[in-house]
Image (spheres, rainbow, N blue to C red):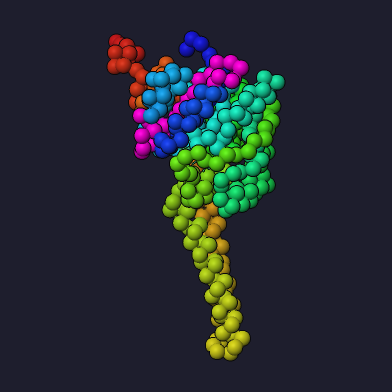
Amino acid sequence: MTEVPDYSIVVPVYDEQEALPELYERLRWLLEHLDGDAEVILVDDGSRDDSYALMLDLNRRDARFKLLQLSRNFGHQVAITAGLDVAAGRAVIVMDADLQDPPETVLAMAERWREGFDVVYGVRRERRGETRFKRATAAVFYRLLQRLADVEIPADAGDFRLLDRKALDAYLAMREHDRYVRGMVSWVGFNQIGVAYSRDERRAGSTKYPFRKMIKFAADGIVSFSNAPLRLALGLGFIVSASSFVYGFVAILLKATGAFTVPGWTSVILVTSFLGGVQLIVLGVIGEYVGRTYIETKRRPLYIVNREAGLADRLTSPDRIVGWPPIHRTEAEADAEAPSD
Ligand code: UDP
Ligand code: MG
């Protein structure tokens, strides 16, 4: 690497072909207005539409737009991490491809960074164009997380943020699979500050976070990955406990009306079914942690790189596993490195 840009803007992209043309225009605007040179790192998180072809075209039109393609969909949080791994800037900015995070706000973030802050996170003042359900669940979740988490995670802050190189390197040292990026960034400390912004409507395309992913994301945030069979016990526990309540209610009703009476039957049924449910819930929760521990013990790479444009020189970092097999090395280079005697 010869020149280091002041800013790297990391954008995770998953099936965003409709949003990309406008994103390009708005980012070009941003690059004009930032007080330093900047690069954009587009991370294609296994898109199934024409996003990759479109982004490759952007890279040809403007070399400041660099491109990393993952081998499949690894998820939003991992895609962000992949982009941060290759970012070279003295400060990096993470923002969504759908322009819900207004590029204009980045200027305000850059200002705070110049003042000496190491992490500048966006705080959503209002959320336009999001369903009432999403807003309500998000509000409940962030408050719950604040109560449960060991670190102070600011409420109503997403992944839209600026990180100084110092904070970024600290973040990148954490290679866990369970990546709740905003929580991890809070954990690294340093001088953090919020910048308020109003979250715009998604410009084009549809959300890549259906209800199911939101639940998973919430679990990652609180427990700190998925293990479906273990989770089955959890769901089962809830169903059994809920039906034990119904069953108990019916048993009491039958007793009260005198329709069916065997001495002790009501209480026995009630207690056994309730305890059975509780035990399954607890087992499920333990399973959740064991499952996560299991995933971490495998020590797999966080993601696998398929192709890149403009980033070949950065995929050689020996301390991070980016891309397997190492696509950037030619066979001759690999042979040269192999022990020769
Ligand atoms: N995204 C991604 N991988 C995924 C899901 C989403 O890279 O598996 C990207 C997506 O393209 C967007 C950002 O993450 O740039 C946020 O996703 P989205 O806007 O769908 O989430 P929402 O704003 O609805 O919560
Ligand atoms: Mg969005």
**Can you see residue 310?**
yes
* Most foreground residue, 130 or 217: 130
Q: Does the magenta stretch include residue 49?
A: yes
Relative height, residue 320 to residue 140 (above, below): above
Measured from the top left, where is residue 144 in percent x and y?
Answer: 65, 49
Measured from the top left, where is residue 207 in percent x and y?
Answer: 48, 44
**Can you see residue 148?**
no
Which quadrant of the view contains residue 220? top right
116 left or right of 16 in image: right
Q: Residue at x 36, y 19 (%)?
A: 328
Give the extent of the magenta segment: 31-53
Relative height, residue 121 to residue 29 (above, below): below
Q: Is residue 190 magenta?
A: no
Measured from the top left, where is residue 253 in percent x and y?
Answer: 59, 82
125 left or right of 298 in image: right
Measured from the top left, where is residue 244 in percent x and y?
Answer: 54, 71
